[in-house]
Image (cartoon, rainbow, N blue to C red):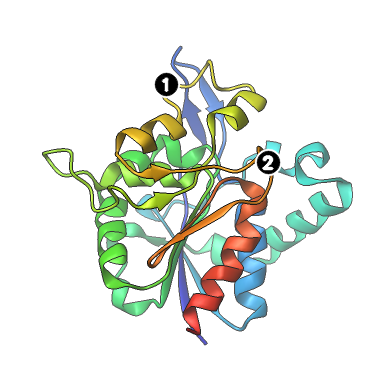
Amino acid sequence: MAKILCVMTGASYWTLKDGHRHPTGYWAEEFVAPYTVFTDAGHEVTVATPRAVVPVVDTMSLRPGMAGGEENSLREEAVIEKAEELRHPISLKEVRLEDYDAVYYPGGHGPMEDLAVDPDSGALLREALASGKPLGVVCHAPAAFLATRDANGDTPFANYRVAGFCNEEEAGVGFADKAKWLLEDELKKLPTDYSRGPAWEPYTVVDRNLITGQNPASSGPLAKLLVKALSA
């Protein structure tokens, strides 16, 4: 059995460029699908957030139209209800990477608000990347890479091949014109070697120990790759 650290947003809103606070959190599928893969494989999950805030699910992600139908929505809600790990997060400040075998970051718009500027998350990501342990980051969660930059703007993620939520998908959910910045643009500036697949289709990229996924549909496939890497 491996121990997997799930680093989640503590944000309940995302500040848009006009100052509006759009209600958000983590995206249901991006927690539920990997959590199910990890626990079905017998692994232990620990949730960590900034200041040990109990993470909130983006209610939009549980709408049947977003969750792939009412049956899927109810199934995801049931997993979230039963996942006690979500009710008892630890603080990112308290995390010791040596206690875990892998690290996973689910997305949602929440990470754009907090993890993109969180120094504790930035330090953890730098350490995790250097450790060689499997590091999975999906959808909007690569926004957390922005917090790994040093005073000179340098990051260890520079030139890594990565995927993340693309501009076309952001436009598809109606936020491309409202956001202060777009993830695809910022990942390219970092600079990473960003690539994408067709909108809304599963797309994952593996570069050394870093596994990234483009969108919610990529979270399950990414989790399977991470579990495979644990047994390699």
Callout 1 amino acid: Lys
Q: In this rendered view, identify the residue nearer to me: 135 or 204.
A: 204
Q: Quadrant of residue 96?
A: bottom left
Callout 2 amino acid: Trp
Q: Is residue 148 left or right of residue 75?
A: left
Q: Quadrant of residue 224?
A: bottom right
Looking at the rendered structure, which numbered label has been put on residue 101? none
Q: In this rendered view, identify the residue nearer to me: 71 or 168.
A: 168
Q: Secondary structure at mark 1?
A: loop
Q: Up-down: is 197 above or below 177?
A: below
Q: In this rendered view, identify the residue nearer to me: 31 or 232.
A: 232
Reading the image, the residue beneath label 1 is 180
Residue drawn at x 69%, y 46% is: 201
Q: Secondary structure at mark 2?
A: loop
Q: Residue furthest bottom?
A: 1
Residue drawn at x 63%, y 21% is: 174
